[in-house]
Structures are given as C-alpha cells and as structure tokens.
Image (cartoon, helix red, strand yellow):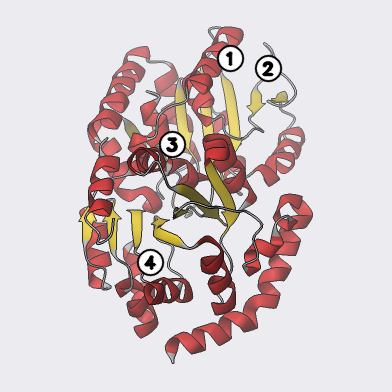
Amino acid sequence: MTRLLYTLLFRAALPLIWLRLYLKGRKQPEYLQHTGERRGFYTQSCDRPLIWIHAVSVGETRAAEPLVRALQTKYPDYQLLMTGMTPTGREAGQKVYGDAVLQAYLPYDTPGAIRRFLDHFQPRLSILMETEIWPNLLAACRQRGIPVILANARLSAESARGYEKLGRLARDAFTGLSGAAAQTEEDAQRLRSLGVSPAEVCGNLKFDVPLPEKMQKLGRQWREAIGTRPVWLAASTREGEEERVLDAWQAVTTPEALLVLVPRHPQRFDEVAALLHRRGLSAVRRSHALPEKETRVWLGDSMGEMVAYYTLADVAFIGGSLLPLGGQNLIEAAACGCPILVGPHTFNFEQATEDALGCGAAQRIANADELAGAINLLLASPEQRQRMRQAALEFAAAHRGATDRTMQLILSLPGC
C-alpha cells in the first residue's frame, strides 16, 4: 500500500516534472531530446546479455569509468548500458566510453515505464552509482530476480534520517538491494541500518579514475602559453559563489596573478560572463581565446577539461563549498597534484575532504576574506605549494583500489 500511494503521488506530480523538464529545455535544448526514453520507450538494440549501470549525471558517469573498464574485462561477451538523467551526463558518457557502452535515460519511476525499460533491455545485473533509490524500479528488479547493487555508495546522516521518515517504503526499497559497495564505514553503517545487506566498505571509485593524458597535455600547453604568471583556479563554482570569489580576487595582492573561473553548470556560462562584464574585469572566455597579459580572469566555459585546468593551476579552490551546497569532489585536483582550498560546507564529500585536510593536501577557509588571505599566502610561498602538491599526490595514491574491492563484491553475488 505504501508503494501504491507513492506511485499515485508520483503520477500526480508528473505534469510538474514534465513542465520542469520543458523549462530546463528552454535554456538547454538537449533536455528536450530523447524524451520518449523518460517514458520507457527505446530504439537502442542489443542482442547480447546486458549489464546496466545507472549514473545520474556527469560526476557519477566519470566516476564509473574504472568499474566499467573492469566489467568489460571480466564480462567481454556482455553489452554495457549506462543510463543517466541529464544531457551533460549522457554527453560525458559518450565522450568517455564511445560506442562501447550504450547510452540512454532512465525512465521516470512509474510501473509502466519501468516495465518497458526492463522488457526492452533485460539486464542481468544492475549497478546504481552512489545512492539512487527508486521504489518501483527496485521492486520490479526484485520481482524479476535482477541483482541490484549500489556502487560508490554514500549516504549522509541527514539523508539517512530522511529515508527513515519514509518508513516501510524506504525499507522495502533498501532491503531489495543485493548489496552496497560503500565509500566509508559511516556510509556502510547507515546503509545497514536501512536494511542493506551486505554493505561493504570498498572506498571511493573516483580515486581510481585515470587522468586523461590528453587533458594533462592541454594544461601544460596552456601553462606554456601563459608563462610564469601565478594562476589560481576557482573550480566548479555554483550560483551565488562567483560574487564571493570575485570579492576575494579584489583582495589578492599579486598583481600579475590570473584567476581561472570555471562554473559548475554550462547553462550559467553566459550569466557569469555578464557578471564579469558588470564588474569591469578584463576577462576572456576559454571558447574565444587564451588569456593575454592584461587578462585578469579567464572564464572556463568548457566541459570535460577540468583536468587541464587543475594541471595549469598553482592553487585550486573547490566550488560549492562557500555556500551550504555540500562542495564538489576534490579527488581529481589531488590526483593532478594541485594544492587545494575548500570552504566550510563540504558535507557531500565529507570523508575525502577530511582525509585531504588531515594529510596537508588541502586547507579549509571560512569565507571570501579567508580565501583571499590563503591565496595570497600560497602564491607567495612556492615551498608551501610544493608541500601541498606532494601531499595531494600521496593522498590520491594511498586511496586507490576501490574498483577491485567493488568487483569482489559483485562477483560474490549469486549468479555473477
């Protein structure tokens, strides 16, 4: 009865969901493509047994790469399908995996759409990246005997309390999972408390993601073109943060320094460009040209080039953390050996952030004033930057191995 009520409420909300999709599509037309897939209608064909991986957006899509490669090696006769919810995630999947992995949208969680999806692809195994819990989807997989595991699973204390309030609906969904490969012991304990068994600590797959040499080379080319100017990067900034970053920028005392500003979401590139214009800053967009000597801000209006930006930068501030948004992933910056600054709000990547702070790879700042002070100190101290750079590389290396542990969990499942 609880799932029936959920389904009725979900159906009632569908007009608003479609309206939201339409409004997003007005800013980003790609949202209005492949809409039939969101209702469970697909044209992709497959004549091989299939393993299905769900990665909601860009971050999860890229984090899945080492696991995808391991699955391709272990199951060479299987087709891999990757579903997501956003066009940027789909585009990232196409860039990373090419035609070796089918790309599609996961349908909305209504019984009919889920039935059509499962009938069409008939997956033998389902892997949900991080924590994607859809009651009708999990119930349908359980009824069909399809094993479903969470990979790279994380569950904050707040999210766990939210699921507990849903009572039997959430418990039935979590107990329907065949297992979970958790990032940390805290994540595993919360998952176990909601009924997941087994929930094993496997670590964070993002530490195993290989750095694309093409992007590292591009970053080195940028550095050669820019020369000896100090460069600090504000990476994956979110709405409301750019104003604070630019406030900090005005307090940076190294006159020749260059700020590279990379917003998290591509639909905001024009908005941030307009902000730079209003501020009267000499700015150039990445899509237009390389920064010149008089350029003060280089706007990173590109996708898939974050490794190049980290390779270029002397110091990186990780966005989403000045405001209570939970922060963005700092693992890629560490793997590039880039000294890291984070704000006070990092609950989305709590364990990785605390580990990076603990080993000296990262420093925490409380606000824009402290951000400016930290940038001033680090740009003035090559020795401190080198210490943080070495700590970042060691931190990234020490945490690898999640892929092997996750594969061990998958292989322990019946039928795998």
For the residues labelled 4 and 3, the Cα–Cα distance comes to: 51 Å
Q: Which residue is mark 1?
A: 222
Pair 1/4: label in front? 4
Query: Which element type, helix, strand or loop, lies under badge 3?
Result: helix
Q: Position of residue 15 (x, y in %)?
A: 70, 76
Q: Secondary structure at mark 4?
A: loop
C-beta proximity under 8 Å, tags 1 and 2: yes
- Graded by Cα atoms within 10 Å as few (under 14), some (14 to 19) or many (20 or more), the crowding at tag 1 reads some
Closer to the eye: label 3 or 2: 2
N-term mark: 3 or 2: 2
- Please identify, in this view, whether the residue under mark 4 or under mark 3 is nearer the observer: 4
Dots 3, 2 in contact, CB < 8 A: no
Mark 3: which amino acid? Glu
Which residue position holds label 2? 290
Q: For the residues labelled 1 and 4, say whether their Cβ atoms are less than 8 Å apart.
A: no
Q: Amino acid at mark 1?
A: Trp
Q: Position of residue 353 (x, y in %)?
A: 33, 42
Q: Which residue is mark 3?
A: 370
Query: In whole angstroms, how far apart are the C-alphas of marks 1 and 2?
Result: 8 Å
Which residue is disc 4 drawn over?
146
* Badge 4 amino acid: Ile
**Residue drawn 54% across the image and 71% down it:** 114
